[in-house]
Amino acid sequence: MRRQLPLLLVAITAFFVMAMKFFNFGEVGAAAIQEADIWIQVTYEFAFLLGAINFTRLHYGNVARKRPKWVYSVVALIAMVLTCIITLVDGVNGEIAVFLYENVANRIDSAIYALLGFYVCSAAYRSFKLKNLEAGILLVSAVLLMLAQAPIGDAIFPGISKVGEWILNVPNSAGMRGIRLGAGIGAYAASIRVILGLERSWTGSGS
Amino acid sequence: MDWEKLQYIDIRILYVIILLCMIIPMFKPIGLPVAISENSRKVYEVIENLPDGSVIWVSHDTGPGNAPELNPMITALARQAFRKNCKLVGTAFFNENVGPTLLYDHINEVAQEMGKEYGVDWVNLGYRINAEACMKVMVDDVWAGVGGVDWTGTPLDNFPLMQQVRSIRNDVDLIFVTTVGSPGYATWMTFVTQPLNKPLTGGASLTMYSGVQHYIRSGQLKGFLGGLRGAAEYEQLVGHPGQGLSGMDAQSMGHITVLVFLLLGNIGYFMARSKNNRQ
Amino acid sequence: MEQLGYIVSSICILMAWSYLIKENALYTFAEHLLVGMAVGRGIAYTIEVQLTPRIVDQMIGQGRWSLLIPALIGCLIYFRFVKGYEWVSRICMAVWIGYGAGNTLAFNPATYMPQVFDSFFKLDSIDNIIYFFVVVSVLWYFIFTVKKDAGFGKQFSMIGRYALMVAFGSAYGSITMAYLSLIIGQLQIILRDTLHLVK
């Protein structure tokens, strides 16, 4: 029962959604699927605390057991509580809430993401070696595209932006399309397996 | 010279070099011209060909990481749309913390400059959980999809624009999406533009730009802007240089630096390999 | 106030970038601060913009008490924290997974048909013929149920492989550009907005 009920629910929900799309049940059907879509939104809205509870359990556990770097977990928990209170009191578009989030969290997030720029440079230096034909093709197309996309490429090699456009529009696009079509077929197969109950990894283990 | 040592330069030295190479053009701009690509021109033209007063749905589906690439696109779109007296309805499905605020800030900056009023000429509906379900509902009932409120929780009754925009099917003429992943252009294409046969355009972070080319080719995307370069091209077409164009010189120098690093690494590798072969 | 914001922003950027030297207390502090603030703002946004209108305007105001059913289904997810009753949370997950799988099968095929038509029915130029050839070779490369040890099968598969290398090289070039422009964004905040050294 504990395993069968969720699997049955997956199949019922999926068949309902597909039936509403593939068959015409008139206005009743249209209203039913719209209500179902709103119900799905509501389920997600009321499950919003899942991440916050996991986050709190993890960091509270670090503090309670005095694990290494537990002080930072205190910082994380205080930041969560204070930000939540300030945003609720001041409003999502409130001056203080926006000031704090845009100038602190947003900046840290984008700066950490920008670190990838440095890592890409070190990857170009350390790992991108011309070891065989395939690596060579990869290297040449990467170099051509980098030169084509930057304005300096056209200044050094006039017309290279057109070469870059051709590479993007023909071989790159064709390769990506092949990948996308293959991935699409894979997604259908995975969805069918899930609906038929053949894919049960999401049910997890335990009681 | 021991060429093999070219493979073993301390990476922190390279970080300093890349920083310097990108900072110097900021002090001494080179002013290189930016050629306009076909894809960017298509984006500009599909919006320019809309009748004046059309409704454009703009979805700023970005996180804080890729926002510097995509924010200039929103600013330039707002400029072109408001010049044509088009109305803008906005959402931001990728990140609830950042997307709605960035969308508001960048459209508001242009709106105030061009005398456009929030609620009359543009509205920000913000983020909603589960983009798929929300989009499916908004196809026929925008108000129900967003729960009847805008991004700050203000009821939509207060906004004259939302009296005329009740469904995407009947009241929206174009969808403009800036995207970094999922939900993004693919979600809009699957649940809105493909079923309704509505035009879809916008821009993507360059991390995924090479992956959208086949959608442009098949006509499912009416052109697409590619990262900061695409934003720079679009700004040129709109006739108002901004953040996109200002970063192009530094971008050029950054590319040259990366290519030099590539060359150094390969020279060191080949020298080491030929030395091993000789031994 | 704006200038104060830029100063705070610059300090935060430098704290994050201190990781380039080595992992340190400043970076770890910034990281935990970010995660805490993100979770906090997410909770507040959901309560203010999504839950409050749903409960106050729709359930109580419009009398749509049927929305209590999905609300309760959504709340079942919290049973994953209750020892012995974790299986109850799978009911909520089942609804989500079924909805997603149903949408995939119902809506995705329509997005692929234009792709197929564009690849296989437009052979009116050299570029389109190359395009068709490359798409078929890439698809052939990904078929693993047929032996491709030698002969035409292997050669054709290798062409697909080389085409994939071009695609991945283009992707790498694009990604490099993307990440470099992110560095530019941060530098503009420090040099232009905070220190006013550049325009």
Image (tube, helix red, strand yellow):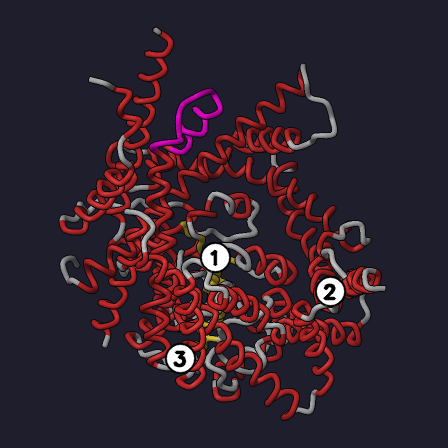
Q: Amino acid at mark 2?
A: Arg
- Image position of B278 with respect to C28: above or below: above
Q: Which mark is residue A93?
A: 3
Residue A203 vs residue A40, the one in the foreground: A203
Left or right? Give the position of B237 relative to A137: left
Q: Which mark is residue C90?
A: 2
Query: Which is in the foreground here, disc 3 or disc 1?
Result: 3
- Assess disc 3: are there few (<14), some (14-19) or many (≥20) residues with their C-alpha within 10 Å of its C-alpha: some
Q: Position of residue B98 (x, y in %)?
A: 42, 67
Span shown in magenta? A125-142
Quadrant in which the N terminus of chain A appears: bottom right
C114 shown above or below A25: above
* Residue at image point 25% right, 62% down: C10
**SS of the residue at dot 1?**
strand
Q: Which mark is residue B179?
A: 1
Asked whether disc 3 touches disc 1, contact meaning CB atoms under 8 Å apart, the reply is: no
At label 1, which amino acid type do we have?
A: Thr
